[in-house]
Image (cartoon, grey):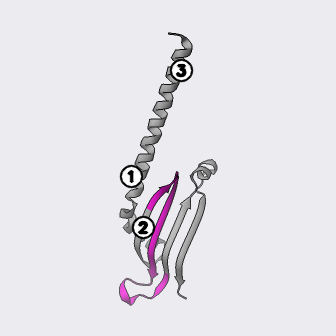
Amino acid sequence: MSSSRQIGRWALTLLATLLALAAVVLLALRVALSQVDQMAPRVERLLEARTGAAVQLHEFNARLARLDPVIEGGGLSLSTQEGSAGLPLLEIEYARLWLDSSASLRTGVPVIADARMRGMTLHL
């Protein structure tokens, strides 16, 4: 077997291995993002610790748009106390955050491509 043919086989084997690894990583990322709704209580506790207000989050989802993660949430409300006794501080009907993966990898910090909120009410 000639050396150029052997190099070609090794190059194709390496390429196939890298493509298989990329497929496994993307599959694991998609599975992890589909389970993010179970993290809603942890997000609520984090927001409560940061703001000092009672937090309720009704919807929390994540998905991949191409190779960019998108986080969506809805029914976010912050109030002074738990239950009906608390006064409302902030209510957000829907929010979406789109992370630009390629720009984030280039700069080394998270780069937000798009952030949108709908139905935001701030009580003063």
Local SS, label 1: helix
Q: Earlier in the sequence, mark 1 or mark 2?
A: 1
Identify which amino acid the numbered label 2 is placed on: Phe
Please tell me which of labels 1 and 3 falls first in the chain: 3
Disc 3/disc 2 C-alpha distance (Å): 48 Å
Magenta span: helix, strand or loop, mainly? strand
- Mark 1 residue type: Val
- Of badges 1 and 3, the one in the foreground is 3
Task: Decide: few, some or many residues near mark 2? Use Cα within 10 Å; few <14, some 14-19, many ≥20.
Answer: many
Q: Quadrant of residue 24?
A: top left
Which quarter of the figure has residue 34? Answer: bottom left
Q: Which residue is mark 2?
A: 60
**Disc 3 crowd, CA 10 A, few/some/many (<14, 14-19, 20+):** few
Q: Are marks 1 and 2 in contact (CB under 8 Å)?
A: no
Q: Which residues are magenta?
A: 62-90
Whole-angstrom CA distance, mark 1 to mark 3, is 35 Å
Residue 71 location, x and y as percent? Answer: 48, 63
Question: Quick one: SS at disc 3?
Answer: helix
Q: Amino acid at mark 3?
A: Gly
Residue at the image position 37 percent from the left and 82 percent from the top: 82
Residue tagged 1: 31
Vertical side of 80 occupied by 35: above or below: above
Q: Is residue 95 magenta?
A: no
Name the residue rendered at 46%, 80% in the picture: 78
Residue corresponding to mark 3: 8
Neighbours of disc 1 within 10 Å: few (<14), some (14-19), many (20+): few
Image position, residue 119 (x, y; %):
52, 80
- Decide which of 97, 47 is in the foreground and name it: 97
